[in-house]
Image: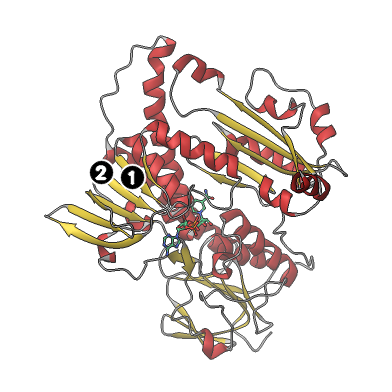
Amino acid sequence: MADYDFDLFVIGGGSAGVRCARISAGHGAKVGIAEERFWGGTCVNVGCVPKKIMVQAAEYGGWADDAPAFGWDIEKRGHDWNVLRQARDGEVARLSGIYRRLLEGAGVTVFEARATFIDAHTLDVGGQRVTAANIVIAVGGKPVRPDIPGVDCGMISDDLFTLEKRPERIVVVGGGYIGVEFACLLHALGSEVTLVYRQKLPLRGFDLELREGLAEALTAQGILLHPGEDLESLGSAGEDGRVVTLKSGQILETEAVMLALGRVPHTEGLGLEKAGIEVDRKGAVLVDEDQATSQKHVFAIGDVTDRVNLTPMATNLGHALADTLFGNKPRHASYENVPKAVFSSPPIGSVGMTEDEADARGKPAEVFVNRFTPMRHAITKRDGRRSVMKVIVDCETRVILGMHMLGEDAPEMMQGFAVAVVNGLTKEQLDRTIGIHPTAAEEFVTLRSPARRVGDPQAAEEDEAA
Ligand code: NDP
């Protein structure tokens, strides 16, 4: 290693890269890191953190509407976008600064520059030649801009965080995490929102019953849904207007358009070919279970590998790689049972298999479902607040295969339950747990009779015979 400038060089100062650099330095490695845009990456600067602050801002709108039902004499007079912007941007700047200071505090050499490969051990870092025994690619992803006429008339999620004024009317295209979250928060802040997506329901990949519940809730709140629709083109109308043409021929006139059509790995122009590093069709770096690329001393972690593109997964991978390379503690981060949340309104929390996935195993599973109106909304009568809770249980082992919730506080609840599910929680263990009363969470420990059984080959044969 003595022949190289660094034991480890990390490209990208986001969640994965910063954790890997910091922990490696803590294990005694000589580490360098390059970041060209902002410390903390997507999550801190144009993702989870500023989004969550906007979600929290949005929640106050609903609470202000609800308060009179509890006797409060409150009049909601409007929302000041600039106050929210300043609060949000201040917090983002504070956290981004912490990320940088953590690196320096750990003894990592920090480069505020773009790094590209010259060869498999050599990088160009802002014009400087740097060599490293090991290199980690942690450059993340970027929003997709589809190849359609007028695409520049649409914003991507990054742009939402620099808007000086909240659009009064917006069409959000894409029914994934970002589309649904921004549709909800912009609607709650006062915008008229239309959500366009190509599936029958938003959030493909989540449990069907939750997706149905969410679509009902969005409609009940007043978000206009256009399911089963795809984008043909975008255009301008007058000075401030936008026109969205859908493949069905329908035309939507609006003030702003947000495109939330997924993200792609940010590998273009990195010079991966010069280092002999293989990527897939989307540009995602191909890695083995040790996160090693086609060059065994070059690793890739986080969204650049396009697997489970979530911040905690990225930090976990970065930590595991640092422990493996320099901490004498070889380990892998697990991709199994990764808990997920969507900060929609109401939000979703989920861990493990959906009902459809349990069914597809061809082994019997019981599905427990509860739908209820949270106590608060029995008073407020606010529309679109029904909760759905599901637990899916393997009939033979009684192990819980999946837990899912649509409803207030679902992400907070699911983090706790996920600890148990990841560690093999059985239905009987769940049932033995005394509820905390009165909470919504107690409904998870009082599910007595299964709503149905799925994945049972015998039952399926009987159904067919009938
Ligand atoms: P998602 O992959 O979640 O959703 C993309 C959406 O765009 C889907 O509705 C998809 O439809 C649709 N789509 C993709 N391509 C096209 C196309 N060519 N034409 C029409 N529709 C299309 O991506 P997002 O951009 O919403 O979010 C990116 C990622 O960021 C997420 O996958 C997640 O990993 C992460 N994220 C996580 C959050 C959280 O943890 N709460 C919050 C925000 C982002 P279809 O389903 O048919 O493919």
Residue 194: which disc? 1
Q: Disc 2 residue type?
A: Arg
Residue 338: which disc? none
- Residue 119 visible? The answer is no
The residue sitting at 44% across, 12% down in the picture is 70
- Residue 14: % across, % down: 51, 62
Label 2 SS:
strand
Label 1 SS:
strand
Q: State the residue in front, 103 or 444.
A: 444
- Residue 251: % across, % down: 25, 53
- Residue 48 visible? The answer is yes
- For the residues bearing labels 2 and 1, Cβ distance under 8 angstroms: yes
Left or right: 58, with 443 as reference point: left
Quadrant (top left/top right/bottom left/bottom right) for the C terminus: top right
Residue 169: which disc? 2
Q: Disc 1 residue type?
A: Thr
- Residue 60: % across, % down: 40, 29
